Amino acid sequence: MTSSPAPQAASVPVPFRPGLEGVPATQSAICDIDGIRGLLTYRGYPLEQLAANSTFLETAYLLIWGELPTIFQLRDFEQEVQMHRRVSFRIRDMMKCFPAGGHPMDALQASAASLGLFYSRRALDDPQYVFDAVVRLIAKIPTMVAAFQLIRKGQDPIQPRDDLAYSANFLYMLTEREPDPIAARIFDRCLILHAEHSLNASTFSARVTASTLTDPYAVVASAVGTLAGPLHGGANEDVLEMLEEIGTVDAVESWLDQAIKARKKIMGFGHREYKVKDPRAVILQKLAEDLFLRFGHDAMYDVARRLEEVAADRLGPKGIYPNVDFYSGLVYRKLGIPRDLFTPIFAIARTAGWLAHWREQLGANRIYRPTQIYTGSGERAWLPLESRPAVV
Ligand code: COA
């Protein structure tokens, strides 16, 4: 069968950049990354200052509405979030039908999307609708993550506790125990660190979905699906597997050399934006050390530190250093969180960033519709079945 050659692409205004590397796809005032100096700011505030002094809900408010809240705004936001933590029994019943062996990210994506069935009005220009949607998503995503954890163990989800703050309540719903206050604060700081990171894949996905003017539940559900992949949020699960595979400090060097020889990607290393150690990894490493001091050491941390040290020689010259996922798994493991919940927890935090981008996108919306460079067949005539050549 013959076909005419593919037509030459019409003149392409910009060169093709795989992965859109370096291509600005939006303007944004939410988050700034200096990948050379290893600096990250949310709305102009350095991440280190927010992680040290702020709470996750305060940071979420800052990201979504652009300014740090006053004491009254913060109390109001916290109260609204607290009032909307419960999820409908219909959603809990739906989750009970999910296979217990399914990945919690899939359960979260389905449950987040189902919120649109309950709050489907798309009054995107109504500030009250926008506020309510923000509150519901920030409030209910953790409840859904915790609910699936208990449901898959054959238990009924437990109700949120109004006397506990956001992170303490999540850990309580997950473990059925009131958490140690220091552990709850460290967890809250982890949420701050994961709350936003400019136009990463899931946020881009959120903005593309938002640009169609669909509802915010679909926006968050699409972003959750994108975050689930191992090249994005899923990497922190893989980091622990990798550290366990390496096993001991002494095995690090030869393991790394073999991995590099086999052209394997080292999980928890590398970032499109950073050419130095990710500032979030710096803070997470410190949080891990704080946790080990209080609750006992983890030998895997020594393996991780040695890997970072050896990798600095081998991968550092290419600008490949630990990213946010390298130490977060060790922190969550010490907090007793099951491995496949690491990415859903990332989603709890990143919901704040996705919603900030949802609002920003709506503020100056134009539907995303990039172009492509067609590389397929030229025009050809349809053949009846009996005339088609056999495929070998
Ligand atoms: N280990 C070893 N080499 C790596 C690497 C890693 N973790 N990350 C990037 N590289 C190398 C690639 O092999 C490639 O080398 P080459 O030019 O010799 O072929 C070069 O660096 C560029 O890599 P590329 O995958 O094109 O970079 P990217 O910007 O598209 O990808 C990541 C960024 C994050 C997807 C990538 O670094 C990665 O896969 N890291 C591991 C997964 C991970 O930790 N993800 C969490 C991100 S927060």
Image: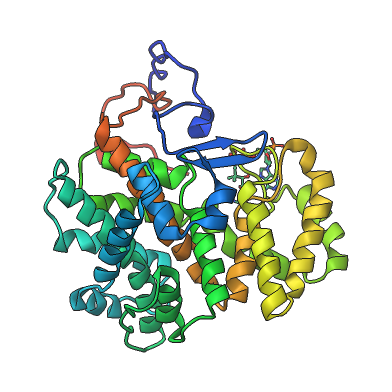
Residue 346 in percent (x, y) is at 48, 59
> Residue placed farthest to the front in the image?
71
> Residue placed farthest to the top in the image?
11
Quadrant housing residue 381: top left
Q: Residue at coordinates 36% horizontally, 89% vertically from top-left?
A: 155
Q: How many marks?
A: 0
Ligand 1 shows up in the quarter that is top right
Q: Is residue 161 above or below residue 39?
A: below
Residue 221 at least partly seen: no
Residue 325 in percent (x, y) is at 60, 56
Q: Residue at coordinates 40% horizontally, 19% vertically from top-left?
A: 6
Q: Nearer the viewer, residue 236 or 132?
A: 132
> Residue placed farthest to the bottom in the image?
155
Residue 189 is left or right of residue 125, and the answer is: right
Residue 239 in percent (x, y) is at 64, 62
Residue 265 in percent (x, y) is at 67, 50
Residue 86 is left or right of residue 327, and the answer is: left
Q: Quadrant for the N terminus, please.
A: top left
Q: Nearer the viewer, residue 335 or 381?
A: 335
Residue 76 at least partly seen: yes
Q: Nearer the viewer, residue 82 or 13?
A: 82
Q: Is residue 17 above or below residue 276?
A: above
Residue 389 is left or right of residue 339, and the answer is: left
**Colour convention of the picture:** rainbow
